[in-house]
């Protein structure tokens, strides 16, 4: 027998009405389940420990902050000046280094935990630490701004964590920059010292060579009995006087040659006779004494103050209670629907 569409539609409508009526009959059950779920969510929201978050934003230093790093560093001195980017790159590497994280974990994070928690697995504790303290990276809107974020149950503690972590990263970067600057100055001073020593040794050999030449000239002057330079008048006098070097050095006379030899042999230092020596010694002394104080430099700039949080970020009580109510209502409807289907099947 063919099904009548009108009859089928009527049956469906009756079944839908019966379902609604059955659910309405179980409204006490649905409301009870919803209330229980809501109370459970509210209990979790109000009795779970609050989590606070502290954050510090970090930006590149100013030109004034890196000025002392560039003291004495010019193109003429063969030492390239540092740029803000050079200094900030050192800081960001230190900020993200595993060495800094590990030292902070051992020296700051672990001592803040209760003794019972410290006895647990170090790997688990380190994973928790990485979750509680993280680094925020630059965005398209702020391409140079990093951040340090800490989460915990104590608002004072998390505020101190971000301060300490940023300060430790800054100190590590400053130490690295100062070591680099000092090392380059030491190398430059050593190179200048070697250059000065070479010039001094060269001048000493030149003096010894001059003494040898003068002694040979003295031998010739004594052999011919020439004690004083010959007196020559006219234009020839100037020409001969100008040529009293080399092979004609003996024409200075034995007295002058002995005096010159004695003077060269008794000379205590050749430094006053070396051209540009003093300028090199001044440069060497400058680089030997070059020092950079950590108090006069900065490798980053804090963007805004570090505010101690006064409201927890977790748990979100209103959202949790609302979610508990929704889930409880859905669960109540499901239980009521299952009871209706089971009773309907038994009745059929």
Image (tube, rainbow, N blue to C red):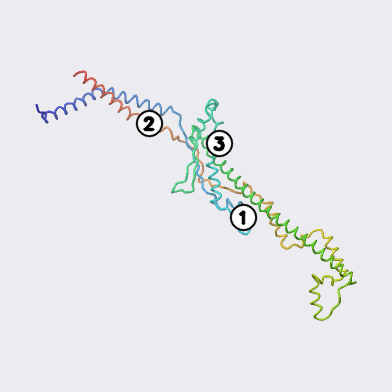
From the image, state whether disc 1 or disc 2 is nearer to you. 1
Question: Residue 24 appears at what percent x and percent y?
Answer: 23, 25
> Residue 102: which disc?
3
Sequence-wise, the earlier of marks 2 and 3 is 3
Which of the 4 image quadrants contains residue 5?
top left
Position of the N terminus, as image quadrant, is top left
For marks 1 and 3, give the CA distance. 35 Å
Please rate how many residues cluster around mark 3, counting C-alpha atoms within 10 Å: few if below 14, some from 14 to 19, many from 20: some
State the residue position of label 2.
Answer: 320
The quadrant holding residue 218 is bottom right
The outermost residue toward the top is 346
Between marks 1 and 2, how big is the CA–CA gap? 61 Å
Q: Earlier in the sequence, mark 1 or mark 2?
A: 1
Q: Is residue 18 above or below residue 94?
A: above
Q: Looking at the image, which residue is at 28% across and 26% down? A: 334
**At 60% across and 45% down in the image, what residue appears?**
176
């Amino acid at each position: 027998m063919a099904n009548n569409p009108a009859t089928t539609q009527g049956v469906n409508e009756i079944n839908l009405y019966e379902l609604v009526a059955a659910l309405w009959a179980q409204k006490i059950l649905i409301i009870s389940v919803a209330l229980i779920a809501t109370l459970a969510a509210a209990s979790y929201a109000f009795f779970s420990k609050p989590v606070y978050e502290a954050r510090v934003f970090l930006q590149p230093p100013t030109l004034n902050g890196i000025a002392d790093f560039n003291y004495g560093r010019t193109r003429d001195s063969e030492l390239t000046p540092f740029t803000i980017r050079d200094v900030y790159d050192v800081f960001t590497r230190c900020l993200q280094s595993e060495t800094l994280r590990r030292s902070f974990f051992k020296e700051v994070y672990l001592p803040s935990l209760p003794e019972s928690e410290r006895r647990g697995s170090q790997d688990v504790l380190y994973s928790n630490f990485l979750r509680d303290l993280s680094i925020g990276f630059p965005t398209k809107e702020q391409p140079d701004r990093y951040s340090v974020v800490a989460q915990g149950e104590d608002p004072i503690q998390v505020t101190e964590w971000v301060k300490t972590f940023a300060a430790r990263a800054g100190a590590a970067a400053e130490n690295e920059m100062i070591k680099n600057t000092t090392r380059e100055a030491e190398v430059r001073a050593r190179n200048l010292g070697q250059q000065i020593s070479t010039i001094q040794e060269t001048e000493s050999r030149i003096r010894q060579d001059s003494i040898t030449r003068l002694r040979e000239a003295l031998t010739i002057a004594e052999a011919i009995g020439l004690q004083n330079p010959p007196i020559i008048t006219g234009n020839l006098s100037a020409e001969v006087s100008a040529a009293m070097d080399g092979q004609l050095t003996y024409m200075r006379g034995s007295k002058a040659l002995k005096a010159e030899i004695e003077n060269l042999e008794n000379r205590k230092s050749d430094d006053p006779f070396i051209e540009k020596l003093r300028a090199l010694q001044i440069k060497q002394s400058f680089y030997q004494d070059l020092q950079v104080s950590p108090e006069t430099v900065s490798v980053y700039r804090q963007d805004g103050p570090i505010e101690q949080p006064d409201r927890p970020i977790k748990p979100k009580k209103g959202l949790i209670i609302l979610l508990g109510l929704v889930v409880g209502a859905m669960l109540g409807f499901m239980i009521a629907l299952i009871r209706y289907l089971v009773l309907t099947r038994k009745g059929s």
